[in-house]
Image (spheres, helix red, strand yellow):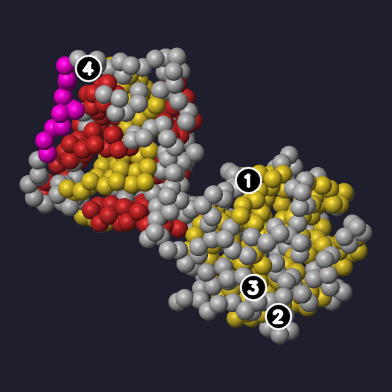
Amino acid sequence: MPAMFSRLLLIFPLIIGLFLCCSGSFAQEEEEYPIPPEAERQEGVPEGKVDGPFTIESKIYSGTQREYWVYVPHQYDAEKPACTMIVQDGLNRAKDWRLPQICDNLIHANEMPVTIGIFVNPGVLPPERAGAQPRFNRSFEYDSLGDNYARFLLEELIPEVSKSYNLSTSPGDRVLAGASSGGICAFNAAWERPDAFRRVISTIGTFVGLRGANELPVLVRKVEPKPLRVFLQDGSNDLNIYAGDWWVANQDLLSSLQWAGYDVKQVWGTGGHNGKHGAAVMPEALRWIWRDYPEPIQVTPSPAAKRRTDIMLADSDWQQISSGHQAAEAPVCNAAGELFFADSKAGRIYRIGEDGKTRIFKEQSGRVSSLGFGPQGNLFAVRDAKQVVRFEPDGKETIILNDIQCQRILTLPEGFYFSDNSTPALHWSTYEGQITMAHTLPEPVAAFTTSADHGFLHAAPVARQFTYHLQIAADRTLKHRQRYGHLHMPYLDATSGVTSMSVDNQGSLFVASNMGIQVLDQLGRVHLILKKPSKPTITGIAFGGAMHDTLFATAGENVYARKLKTRGMASYETAVELPKPGL
């Protein structure tokens, strides 16, 4: 590594630290905080050591280099996996918080577990030309939403450190910590990957509109709560600039976390954008973040969280009910609540009965992309994108439509809609095969379904952040199309990734998307986002079960089920009268 760039890696965090210490002082003189006794060397307490600096080059942040240091407590035993605390902004941030001394004292007093500290700098891309600036990655890595930084930690940094130290892989054994942009970085990485990180310490966190972090308080309220424990610190004289007001933003995030039932603690002061208050409260933060360890972190529903869409059951989560398929998709349930789904690559249709066993319903069914039950209990399927086929309960098949362009089907009591993405358009057909044009579309739609009262049709293009809303006329044509439902999209994604829709008898619309299963009210507003059952794309959702209160989902090779506090409605069922929505 060139000597100049090596010096730059050392100087860059100092520049950041100087900014953090000085930027808040323009408003008024900073308040002073006493150094906590836990930050001083104490007699009889064995000292840990800090190894490093080490250098790591990233592939996720292509070409960037960064230094990191490893704090090793005296009590560390290489035979036993240690907890981990990853601190953004490297050794300078750790020293500013006086972490090595504090950890020595708290570990010795059994007030926190034996913990390896990883103090990592943000990445820097060295210049190719003499005199050119490097690329400083701190804001890009720390202020951005999305899972890139969590991936860097899990796929690059932690595996590298684990070559030399025995680190626990349990998510409850890991703390992410940072100040300013490092604070939002710590929170966001845990938010994206709660399966890997459960504890967060953020001081003077930058939860403002630099790169989208201002959206986090809204997402915390809407996304199904995650098992995180969060410590927040900020001061009333923190920054207030073009991107937002840090003091207000931290209080907004706190309000959202409390409303949604998270395990959260805040310590507010009157300081500015510096590390003084954070250093003073760090012993308190560490005791609180590790309290009751190793008990698992849980989300406790808050009495204040009165969701308009209250459908989650406390002890209900996704359960895998069928696996090992090549490509599970197109789930649909019959009147008894039994699940049928297709394996498009294997050319089979499966059935899961009341006994929970998966059986083949139809062998050599062709490539089925969509299924729907008719009112008489027959199963209708889109095959090879050119046929609609009716299957009797015994598997006997009859071709209803042939030589058409068709991707999706939606069965109603009197007939069915099907989509033609080549035109694009939605068509209506009777169960005898008489077709009429229902509506031409400005773009292909990936999913559509009716409202439970059969008054409207919901439809969603795959690449948009909205759903269409169309009125169903008496002759089954569709009219008065409007962009209606607002969807959330993952950070910087160009598509919502909608694949499937379903409704319940209260008028809620369930939309399977890249963000999860978004639950919209009748007015097109997302109230809740249920987590995905697994990482692969959800290919379909459908309500079923004996009480029609089970949401089924297909994703990748597997099929999942989850009970909810609602009753799903199949499109072929008789229309119901919906409650008037709250405006």
Extreme residue toward the bottom, this view: 474
Binning the other alpha carbons within 10 Å of mark 4 as few (below 14), some (14 to 19) or many (20 upward) gives some
Horizontal and vertical percent position of residue 184 = 34, 44
Q: Secondary structure at mark 4?
A: loop
| Residue drawn at x 44%, y 37% as measured from the top left | 296
Measure the alpha-carbon separation of dots 3 and 2.
17 Å
Q: Secondary structure at mark 2?
A: loop
Name the residue type under label 2.
Thr
Name the residue type under label 1.
Gln
Q: Secondary structure at mark 3?
A: loop
For residue 302, say whether it is visible: yes
Q: Is 70 rendered above or below residue 538? A: above
| Residue drawn at x 25%, y 52% as measured from the top left | 246
Residue that carries the numbered disc 4 in the rendered image:
45
Measure the alpha-carbon separation of dots 1 and 4.
48 Å
Horizontal and vertical percent position of residue 347 = 82, 48
Label disc, if present, on residue 452 of the rendered structure: 3
Q: Where on the picture, by quarter, is residue 443?
A: bottom right
